[in-house]
Amino acid sequence: MKKITALFLSLLMVFGIFASTASAAATEKKEKSPIIFIAGSSIEICDAEGNEISTGFDVITDDDEGDMTTDKIIETAMNILKPFLLEGLPFNKWDNYGKALYEELAPIWDETQLDGDGNAKYGTGVSKAEIEKWDKKAQTQNTGADGTFNINDYKFRYDWRLSPYDHVDRLHKYIQDIIKTTKCSQVCLVGRCLGGSVITAYLEKYGDQGLVKKVFYDEVMSNGSSIVNDCFSGKIAFSDKHSQSYLLQAEYFGRDGQGIDLEGISEFTLELVEAVLDYATQAGILNMVFGGVENLYERLYEAFIPAMLRATGIGTWANYWCSVYEEDFDQALDLVFGKEGTETRKENAGLVKKIQYIREHIVKAAPDLYKKFADEYGVEIGVLAGYGLTNAPIMEHFDETSDCVVGFVDASFGGTAAGLFDTLSDEYIAEKEAQGLGEYISPDRKIDASTCLFPETTWIIKNKHHDYGSSYVYLAEYFTQYTNVTVNSNSRDIGRFLVFDSSDKREFVNMTEENMADGSWITEVQQKPTFRSVFASFVEMMKLIWKALSDFFNGLFNS
């Protein structure tokens, strides 16, 4: 009898294993759907001859053409400082300061700005050779013989400064060419950062044609970004703790060339800067300094912000306006381009019209727009959102947890998050657990995924920098190329909550209670200073200063 029972149990176990494997195979299958990857501002912008131009602040140090010599920099600075010192500070009159700021800086970034109609100047944009290369691939390349496609098979190149609606017709043709080439009925779209806006604009116009099967939004800015929003609306603020954590975070990522590049800065210099900042933070000195800076900013921001944003071109980049929140849109538009009837507003009437179209069709329409994509057009939507990093510490939203560029709430399509240094309250978690939603609370008690628009297909990675790693490639390819992939149902053991891990080939591991610790940029910040911690930070700072002085004088005498 025991032998019969053992045999029966063995057969049952074998059958169970087989059935389980067969079930997994039945629910998850390969799909032959080409992927079109749409990146963000990493796409190079070139002049009419195909030479790359700078769209960042490094243009000041770019002396290839001799247009920013040391003498020119000094002259520019003096022309800006005159109205600042002679009119602004003593008489609180800033109009001439703003005018000088714009007139002196605008020529430096002239090529990067869009004109008053929202078009690129001087034939700048993505090089024709780059666009032709990918257009040719769309018409000749036929991959996917193994049943799946690669994220690098097809890339849509576009000028990310322009309105996303300026690209949707060309993207539509690109999709049609790929469908014709691959003989597939639909494609999958993967949007990263600013690329998400292009996808949203495309689906808003062409989604009803059924050419898109799946979309993967990776840390996109199309649902808003507090960095853009707060800059454009003038909501600048300063925080001592977040400044300290931002520096620590920059050091961590700067070693790998991500975020702020710290290459060339010695370990000792960084250590000294961190010690000074730590003491200034804990002793309250930094907050006093910030208080003075904020008082000055309140006096001059209406001249400073529009001049800087329009001169550098940033405020003219229509795609960035997808990131401005609806509640701040009017304020931002009036600040950057002036109110209705002003000369600046008239000069930029065409651009403002494009920006207002973005507001009506993307900013105000979400999240209903995404639900329409899913429910009416049948588009399956996957999302990747990061958190655990601090935003730039000069924003009103400095305390939100983010991937250092996009806040978690925006990137996750409506998830709930505690502040950078906080956790969700016990009462909040208890209420969620009573509702049967406990599984949506992250192990570190910082995130509630139940409020995400697509909670079952939203993956959340902690401590991953916006610009760091290829995690999105792995997840995007997997989600788009296999059926029935969710956070709770997939054959690769990829959970809802993940932790960035550069030693892992996928660059993430599942979050557990053992590996959920905050990054050093948070844990090294003293949140509740005591006399002992202030004194200890002072001693550490003085030790490093003494070492710096000793090294200096030793080197001086020895030489």
Image: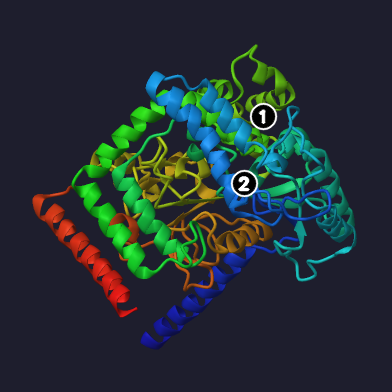
Is 26 located above or below residue 60 in the figure?
Answer: below
Residue in the image at 49% along x and 30% along y? 82
Disc 1 or disc 2, which is closer to the eye? 1
Query: In the rendered view of the protein, which quadrant contains the C terminus?
Result: bottom left
Is the residue marked by circle 1 packed among few (<14), some (14-19), or many (20+) residues within 10 Å? many
Q: Position of residue 406 (x, y in %)?
A: 50, 45
Disc assigned to residue 458: none
Q: Could you tell me if residue 527 is visible in this image? A: no
Which three-letter amino acid code belongs to the residue tagged 2? Answer: Ile
Is 466 located above or below residue 30 in the figure?
Answer: above
Residue 275: image quadrant is bottom left
Pointer 1 residue: 358
Is 489 located above or below residue 222 in the figure?
Answer: below
Q: Residue furthest top?
A: 341
Is 124 located above or below residue 443 in the figure?
Answer: above
Q: Is residue 315 left or right of residue 278?
A: right
Q: Earlier in the sequence, mark 1 or mark 2?
A: 1
Is the residue marked by circle 2 packed among few (<14), some (14-19), or many (20+) residues within 10 Å? many
Q: Is residue 466 left or right of residue 138?
A: left
Residue in the image at 81% along x and 66% along y? 143
Q: Nearer the viewer, residue 367 or 387?
A: 387
Q: Position of residue 505 (x, y in %)?
A: 53, 73
Q: Is residue 155 left or right of residue 435?
A: right
Which three-letter amino acid code belongs to the residue tagged 1? Answer: Ile
Pointer 2 residue: 381
Whole-angstrom CA distance, mark 1 to mark 2, is: 21 Å
Residue 429: image quadrant is top left
Q: Could you tell me if residue 414 is visible in this image? A: yes
Residue in the image at 63% along x and 63% along y? 26
Q: Secondary structure at mark 1?
A: helix
Find out whether the residues at labels 1 and 2 contact each other: C-beta distance under 8 Å.
Answer: no
